[in-house]
Image: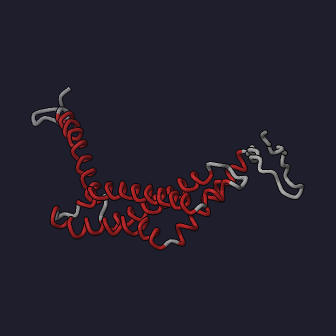
Amino acid sequence: MSTTAPTTMRRPAPDRPSRAAPRAVRQSPATALRDVSAMTGRELRRTLRSVDGLVTALMLPVLIMLVFVIVFGGAIEDDGSYVDYVVPGILVLCLGFGSATAALSVAQDMTSGTINRFKTLPIFGPSVLWAHVLASTVRNLVSATLVLLVAVALGLGRLARQRALGHAQAALLPRFEVDALSRVGDLPRAGGGGVR
């Protein structure tokens, strides 16, 4: 004879909430934009509070550029035009540092449980990732601006401006020669009037 335990349905106590999945809340574009801006502000504050992040994002590209231009640049070219070749590479380096910083901050949010806490809030889901991307963009713009300011102080574009002036003179010189040669026929001749 087998005895089976009676099966009873357990209902949650009236004071305890049920464990049903939360309903998805539809967000308007305005609330999604508000959530993205709030998360972007959070990420920018984290950047400002992190000294090593600021040094990596802002000062390291400038210092690397200074080393390449001042230390190695004199050995390669004496006229100082080496900065024109180094700056594009340093700007790409800024982008690489910026994307690595964004990836590290996303990984830190994932491992620390911050993303899990954000999942429980009624916020726009991708706002955290959008915030990391936008904060990385702001960091990259500030870093690139700083690199360009230091590069201009080191003489960026001086040789390029001289070359452009030389190219403009070379482009205009044939025009002046043709113009001058066409006027030769208008000059009065020694024996009489001009050519008609």
- Left or right of residue 181, residue 112 in this image: right
Instruction: Please count the marks in the image.
Output: 0
Q: Residue at x 88, y 58 (%)?
A: 15
- Left or right of residue 82, residue 21 in this image: right
Give percent across and percent down for residue 126: 61, 48
Q: Residue at x 24, y 69 (%)?
A: 70
Q: Residue at x 17, y 62 (%)?
A: 77
In front: 130, or 20?
20
| Image quarter (top left, top right, bottom left or bottom right) of the C terminus | top left
- The image shows residue 28, relative to residue 194, as above or below, that is below
Q: Residue at x 58, y 51 (%)?
A: 130
In front: 60, or 13?
13
Which quadrant of the view contains residue 172?
Answer: top left
Which quadrant of the view contains residue 159?
Answer: bottom left
Can see residue 64?
Answer: yes
| Image quarter (top left, top right, bottom left or bottom right) of the N terminus | top right
Can see residue 141?
Answer: no
The residue furthest front is: 1
Give percent across and percent down for residue 57: 43, 65
- Left or right of residue 177, residue 53 in this image: right
Give percent across and percent down for residue 101: 46, 60
Give percent across and percent down for residue 153: 34, 68
In front: 37, or 128?
128
